[in-house]
Image: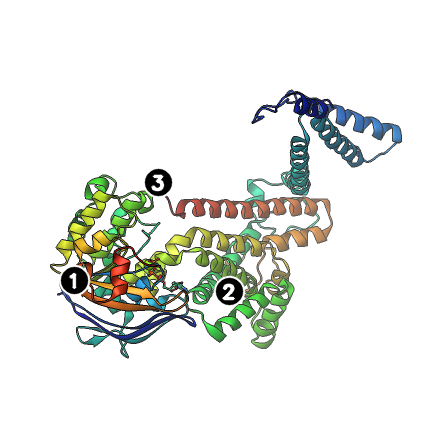
Amino acid sequence: MAKRIDVSGLNAYYGAHKAIDDISMTIEPRSVTAFIGPSGCGKSTFLRTLNRMHEVTPGGRVEGKVLLDDENLYGAGVDPVAVRRTVGMVFQRPNPFPTMSIFDNVAAGLRLNGKYRKSELKDIVERSLKGANLWNEVKDRLNKPGSGLSGGQQQRLCIARAIAVEPQVLLMDEPCSALDPISTLAIEDLIGELKERFTIVIVTHNMQQAARVSDRTAFFNLAAVGKPGKLIEIDETERIFSNPSVQATEDYISGRFG
Amino acid sequence: MTVATSHRHRKVAEPRPPLALKQSRLPRWTLPVLALVAVGAGCGIGLVAGLDSTVQWGLIAALLFVLATYLLTTAVEGTRQAKDRLATSAVWTAFLLAVVPLASLLWETVARGTKVLDGYFLSHSMGTLPDALPGGGVYHAIIGTLEQVGLATLIAAPLGLLTAIYLVEYGRGRLAKVVTFFVDVMTGIPSIVAGLFVLSVWILILGFGPSGFAGSMALAILMMPVVVRSTEEMLKLVPNELREASLALGVPKWRTILKVVLPTSIGGITTGVMLAIARITGETAPVLLLVWGAKTINNNPFDGAQQSLPLYVFQQWQQGSDASYDRAWAAALVLIAFVMVLNLVARGIARWKAPKAGR
Ligand SMILES: Nc1ncnc2c1ncn2[C@@H]1O[C@H](COP(=O)(O)OP(=O)(O)OP(=O)(O)O)[C@@H](O)[C@H]1O
Ligand SMILES: [Mg+2]
């Protein structure tokens, strides 16, 4: 049940500071969309507006529309909790719950929402951990705290936790920045599998990764330091990497910028 | 005294070795010997000068010791080491100054309190025993303290916790500022004022009689701001990433607070509550005003006068007989032990509940 995302005229603020300016794009269901762009251009901010996590930051404010299959996430009466159940998220830095075991961390989304059958829980946890390529490393220590894992393992634990609730859209903010090449490959394979069922948005600083995993790529840029970030263009990944329509995109991809 | 000169010598004569990792050191026995000498000299000076306070002897000895180590270390090991020794001495002096009153208080209480402290003392009330006679016990006061403090905790802990959660997780704008302001004001309320407040409302206006519960209300007023403050600080320590991780799973905010934020900080929160309990356990003034004190056992905190440990100490001391002095000391010892046990329990819970890392 993947969903299409339609963004139009989206601005996001931190207090008085405008972080992203007038962004409109369409994200196709059952596809992988990659966000690339220089640091600080608002990729994370934009990603967080897609599941209403931006407003969690103190001073965070959003203007504009985000349609999830024709329903505006920012419409009146929309429950942010329901939005986040549908649109899952993996953060830039791993953040397992320190008081919970590995098993409980993966089960957290289901347990905290109270929607599970006990017998299913074990299967779901195992499936999710296998999906995140972590199962073999932790299967003997499922009851140990999640904070006792290495950074890369923690990140895969967080991915397992996010996919355990079976969201329809999965937002990933540089999910591989803490991972070794093998785990990265595993995550990329996982993304390939997940896109059969979900809509996936991934922020990455790794051009090869964007080229490998994504169907469409969006390039963001800053006009100047202190100015809000803007969407420069979004297109088929192949076109972006071979023959982009904007010069700035080509400069960024080929390393000629700044 | 020769190190400095030899240094200068070497500089002229030959290039210095790139890193001087080794240097001359005082032999290990120097410090104890110096200490002994200083104590001896202190006593000697004290005797000769005819000072009769041993505290003065000790101060002289300490000063001599610090001075001697400083000079000797400067001469042999260099100024940096000497400063290090000086700082170490200062830290130890401060430590001793802080510990001396505590230790002497404990010593005094244990020495005097154990005289009549036994099973009989802990399991009997005063009953009809005349105050001048030996015998009697604190059972009624222990019951009273347990019930009053327990009730106060039942009132203040949930209220304080909820207030802190509101302030940290929800509080924005005006209301939060007002609440914070009143919590600050409440922190400064003297216990007698809290007692008078409950006295005027509960007993004078509403017409209830004295009871353990009346005392609990005053104690709760004293306890609440402490709970709010400590819980607030603990909740603020929980990293925002954890809240976001939970929210991003589609978990509602209240469940996030209940299942992620509170478990992460539960150790610190419990410690805060326990310390607040320890603080109100020793309160005398509100109990005197509202619970009145009693000589017999009253198990019902909602009806009639009760006793409590600090009030018992106060009243026994007032009696002024030898037997009542002994009882006052013994009850004070019981009170200290009670608070100590509470603190130990708090530490235990904090350690047990603290987020664990490692495999
Ligand atoms: N919590 C915050 N409070 C205030 N300003 C913020 C906050 N988070 C981000 N910003 C600002 O918003 C802008 C966009 O930040 P964002 O994190 O979205 O960048 P990004 O594209 O994800 O960068 P990176 O590639 O380094 O992760 C930056 O100018 C940043 O300074
Ligand atoms: Mg980012």
Determine which of the numbered discs, if any, sits on residue A239 in the image.
Answer: 1
Mark 3 falls within which chain? B
Q: In this view, does B240 lie above or below A27?
A: above
Distance, label 2 to label 1, CA atoms, is 81 Å
**Residue B14 location, x and y as percent?**
63, 21
Relative to B334, say whether A90 is above or below. below
**Identity of the residue furthest to the right in this view:** B49
Dot 2 or dot 3, earlier in sequence: 2
**Mark 2 and mark 1 residues within 8 Å of each other at the beta carbon:** no
Q: Residues within 10 Å of mark 1 (few under 14, many from 20)?
A: few
Which chain is indicated by disc 2? B
| Picture coordinates of residue B144, whole percent (x, y) | 54, 56
Provide the chain ID for the residue under circle 1. A
SS under mark 1: helix
- Pointer 2 residue: B302
> Which image quarter holds the C terminus of chain B?
top left
The residue labelled by disc 3 is B358
- The structure residue drawn at horizontal position 76% and vertical position 27%, both measured from the top left corner, is B38
Can residue B63 be seen here? The reply is yes
Discs 2 and 3 carry the same chain letter: yes
- Residue appearing at x 14%, y 54% in the figure: A192
